[in-house]
Image: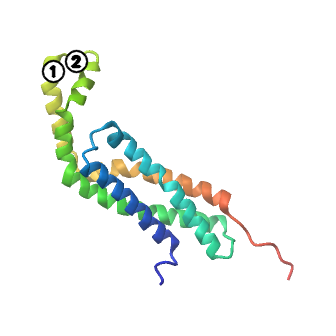
Amino acid sequence: MMIFRNKSLLFALAYSALVIAFKLLIVLGGYAITDFGFKWSQIITVFLIIPFIWLTVKSTRAQKGGYIGGKEALQKGLQMTMIAVVLISVYNYIEFGWKWKEIAQVYYNSDSYHHFLEKSQGIKPEQYPAIIDAQVKSFTMLSPFRYTTFKLIPYLFFGISTSFIFSVFMKRNPPFSLN
């Protein structure tokens, strides 16, 4: 089939499916407001792009008889990154409208946020309700587009730089022939 020849598309779909499944597990499992769900899950999904870009370039090189130029390796890595970023951005846009306003309401009224406020210097306990209301209001005023853009930047930065690094180190030129 033609779809399996485009390694960039194939690995971008696999990466996106894995990231979306992981994010759904975090959100639907109730882990979104935990330290792992809020901070580490984003970092993990961004770093997870590394093996998929490597597989894209490596399989394209294998498909071409073990040789690939640096420009083509960069192109394949960037194609994989861009396809994955578009798919994950669509998911993030939907996820924000579907769940994150509800999650923000729960988080800002949770004990962990109250502990955060207690640790903050210069904030008095009588100020907590006003701060919580302001945080919830600012989050509910956030548009899905801005949220998606905020989530998109690390994927782009890391995907582009990883593609460049792999294009430099994985290029293989065919042996020179005098024929």
Q: Quadrant of the C terminus?
A: bottom right
**Residue at 69%, 72% in the rendered image:** 66
Question: Circle 2: is it few (<14), some (14-19), or many (20+) Cα within 10 Å?
Answer: few
Q: Secondary structure at mark 1?
A: helix
Q: Are marks 2 and 1 in contact (CB under 8 Å)?
A: yes
Please tell me in which quadrant of the rendered image residue 166 appears.
Answer: bottom right
Q: Secondary structure at mark 2?
A: loop
| Residue marked by disc 2 | 123
**Residue at 24%, 20% in the rendered image:** 118
Task: Give how far across and how far down residue 3 sits, in percent.
Answer: 46, 79
Q: Is residue 102 left or right of residue 14?
A: left
**Residue at 21%, 26% in the rendered image:** 114
Task: Give how far across and how far down residue 28 sits, in percent.
Answer: 24, 51
Per the model, the C-alpha gap separating discs 2 and 1 is 7 Å
Q: Is residue 13 left or right of residue 106?
A: right
How many numbered tags mark residues here?
2
Q: Which mark is residue 127?
A: 1
- Name the amino acid type tagged 2: Ile
- Name the amino acid type tagged 1: Gln
The colour scheme of the drawn protein is rainbow
Task: Give how far across and how far down residue 76 sits, in percent.
Answer: 55, 67
Question: Up-down: is 80 above or below 27?
Answer: below
Q: Is residue 53 left or right of residue 109?
A: right
Residue 126 seen by the camera: yes
Question: Circle 1: is it few (<14), some (14-19), or many (20+) Cα within 10 Å?
Answer: few
**Residue at 38%, 63% in the rendered image:** 17
